[in-house]
Amino acid sequence: MQLVIHRGTKEVGGSCVELISSQTRIIIDLGLPLVDKQGEPFDSKVLKGRVIEDLIGEKILPDVKGLYSNGERGIDAIFLSHSHQDHYGLLGYIHPDIPVYMSQGAKMLIEISNLFIPVKVNLPNVIVLEKWQPVEIGDFVVKPYLVDHSAPDARAFLVKSKSTGKRLFYSGDFRGHGRKKVVLDNLISHPVKHVDCLVMEGTMLGRDDTGYENEEAVEARMTEIFGLKENMAFVFCSSQNIDRLVSVYRAAKRTQQTLVIDLYTAYILDSLKVISGKLPQYWWEDIKVIYFQHHAEVLANSGLKNFLYRCKSAKIEKEEVNRNKKNIMMVAKYNYDFRRLLRYLDDLAGAVAIYSMWEGYLERSNLREALKQKGIELELVHTSGHATERDLKRLEEAFKPKCLVPIHTFQPQEYVSLFHNVHMLNDGEELVI
């Protein structure tokens, strides 16, 4: 078995891994970079109107023969670990005959993202993976494992070569402190045996861990803040971070607040009820939905007018939000719709705001200043979607791999002092397992 990490050996984001055995070739993940050559945030606008050859030449697309739609197919299958764009955002360039395997949750979220965001990834050949059910692709047997991550329904993969018996485990993005932390505990209690190579993420290595210990701690702090507030509350978080939305809802319910969500968030929660029947939903009595024009137009133009009609029973107008501010907690995004709403709302003295995403995004915006102009202080209440150093060590010690390869990290050199049998690669370098 040969392993080639085309991108990800020394950066977070843009992951692309190739495995080769007995003329079978598979790819795991094909994501948008998070940073450009200068280390600045990657601007997806550079993709617009560009041809595949140019994007390969500029190293935006990994140079993988037989992967793209401009040539003959040479890849047998692609496996997607989860629905974050730094893992799937370049799939729109692949050869249309290549099957793409992913979880039901990942498929749904990509389809929803295609409706609402500029970077479209329309895939004609998607096959839904069942948890822990192996798939045979030529010489490979690929077994998906459910993992705890901020993206719902995320997967790790065990890949075995039938001809050589070699076994590689790709961790994908994972953690051990979310609402599905038992998944990692079970994997460590019953580890995969005889792992020849563990390809393991290390996003949090080298970062200051200033966040909260786990999702329960996030929920507890939100509950404290909501219980003491004297006016409206805003929580800035991703609508695709389902664990966080559950924390927000539970904190609002404990403090007898009405939770206000937008149509985009409502549609995500409604779609994902097929994989979890316990997710908060727009028809619950303590949830209201605010309509923003862009969201309503997208849904209407996508043949989803029925969903708009169903949400009408939970619709809340901005006038009602303004009247009942003291009893409202709103999930917000710092965008045009929020800025317009903020200008409309009066008397926000005593209002509070929580930022519940990676702090790096906050530092790139002027959200804190915009809120301060309204007299609103912002507090960071967040826990990472990625494994701590402790949980990385737990996984490595349980698996005891013959070889450990860093991926999805800006600090690959730290692996050497933390783990055993580390083999650091460069992007594009081949490792024979």
Image: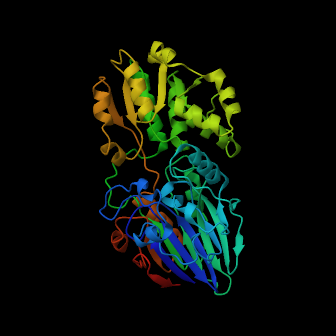
Residue 215 vertical position relative to residue 82 in the rendered view, above or below:
above
Number of dots carrying numbers: 0
Residue 222: quarter of image: top left
Q: Is residue 310 left or right of residue 263?
A: right
Instruction: Name the quarter where the N terminus is drawn.
Output: bottom right
Q: Is residue 369 left or right of residue 192?
A: left
Q: Is residue 398 left or right of residue 9?
A: right
Residue 260 vertical position relative to residue 43 in the rendered view, above or below:
above
**Residue 285 in sight from this viewpoint:** no
Residue 374 vertical position relative to residue 32 in the rendered view, above or below:
above
Q: Position of residue 114 (x, y in %)?
A: 58, 48
Q: Position of residue 161 (x, y in %)?
A: 64, 81
Residue furthest toward the top? Answer: 323
| Residue positioned 32% across, 26% down in the render | 376
Q: Nearer the viewer, residue 110 or 143?
A: 110
Q: Nearer the viewer, residue 131 or 76?
A: 76
Residue 19: quarter of image: bottom right
| Residue positioned 62% across, 49% down in the render | 111
| Residue positioned 43% across, 30% down in the render | 338
Q: Position of residue 14 (x, y in %)?
A: 45, 63
Q: Is residue 280 left or right of residue 420?
A: right
| Residue positioned 51% across, 54% down in the render | 84
Q: Position of residue 92 (x, y in %)?
A: 57, 60
Image coloring type = rainbow
**Residue 305 in sight from this viewpoint:** yes
Q: Nearer the viewer, residue 258 or 44?
A: 44
